[in-house]
Amino acid sequence: MAPESTWSSIGFVEPSFSSPKRVGRDGFLGLRFARRFGRTILAQCRFRLPLQALTPFELADGTACLMLLNPTGGLVGGDFLCTQIIQEPDTRVCLTTPSATRVYRTRDQPTVQETSIHVGETAALEYFPDHVIPHQDSKFHQSLRVEMARGSRGMFWDALAAGRVAHGEHWNFHEFDSRTEIFLCGHPVFLNRTRIRPAELDPARLGLAEGFNYLATLAIVVDEFDRSKETVAAMGAELTSMPHVYGGASVLAGGGCVVKLLARSAADLLHAQTTLWGCARQMVFGSAAVDLRKY
């Protein structure tokens, strides 16, 4: 069933399902960032549980950092979560989550999570949610669509666990389907889809995840970027220094680069994320690495 759309009082389009027979909840989060008196501020915020946002705080380089929150503790089958984010020109924003996203088992309906982001002219975005942990028998469909304007810069992180590894769960969820579409000045520069159905094709087999329990993608998209090859070399050097991480980096034709990696443990994944993020901040923004304490 397709969602209905309702215009909110501050200009966001809130989709929702009207069927009373559907299991799950409709969550919505709408954010608008603006530039005021030389600073990036959160100009508008609207949410409906199970989505919420914490109060933003400012990093040393002036970036407004905000944590996207699901206070219910996890996602269940039938949940439909929609996030809409608008960055006005010249804003600098960092979006992350306080912890990993847990997707619980379902009998039938998948959990659906859709995120759309508009990055205005000469704006900068760092999108680094923690990884997804699909529980046994879960179904999770997520999508991220980003529209970037001229002169904008963005870094986007997407990561997945094989399951609750500490509980002995490895690739025993029903389905994980993730789409990422990034457009720069109306042209597609990064299109990626990861669809895993372990019952049909075991990810642990030779040539796929093998003995690794985590997989991740880092996409860096920058308009008129002349340091793509240099950034790829720096990312490759960082990956080489990580003995329990396997991956590689390549240049994007539209400007920027992409990194794909596999990690054996959550600690290895976190180390890779922190290291690559810090390197990318220096190469793309000329800013120092950040340490966001989440515990």
Image (tube, grey):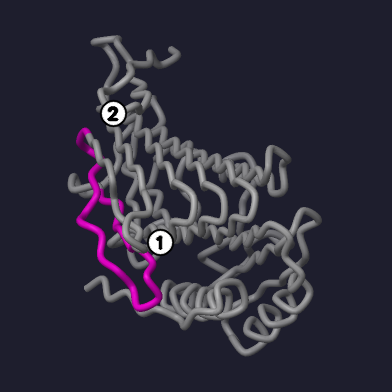
Camera-side mark, 1 or 2: 2
Q: Which residue is mark 1?
A: 94
Instruction: Give the residue pinned by disc 2.
Output: 10
Q: Is residue 1 above or below residue 131?
A: above
The part of the image, by quadrant, that contains residue 109 is top left
Find residue 43 and report its horizontal and vertical position in percent: 28, 46
Question: For the point 58% across and 59% down, which residue is it?
Answer: 153
Q: Quadrant of residue 152?
A: bottom right
SS assignment at label 2: loop
Pick whichever of labels 1 and 2 is earlier in the sequence. Answer: 2
The amino acid beneath tag 1 is: Cys
- Residue shown at the point (55%, 43%) measured from the top left: 146
| Mark 1 surroundings: few (<14), some (14-19) or many (≥20) residues within 10 A | many
Q: CA distance from mark 1 to mark 2?
A: 22 Å
Residue 267: mark in rendering: none
Image position of 253 (left or right of 70): right
In the rendered view of the protein, which quadrant contains the N terminus?
A: top left
Residue 169 seen by the camera: no
Report the magenta residues as a range: 48-69
Q: Nearer the viewer, residue 139 or 98?
A: 98
Residue at the spot 52% in from the left edge and 64% down from the top edge: 214
Q: Residue at x 36, y 63 (%)?
A: 38
Question: How many numbered marks does the figure carry?
Answer: 2
Is 152 situated left or right of 37 in this image? right
Q: Position of residue 295 (x, y in %)?
A: 22, 73
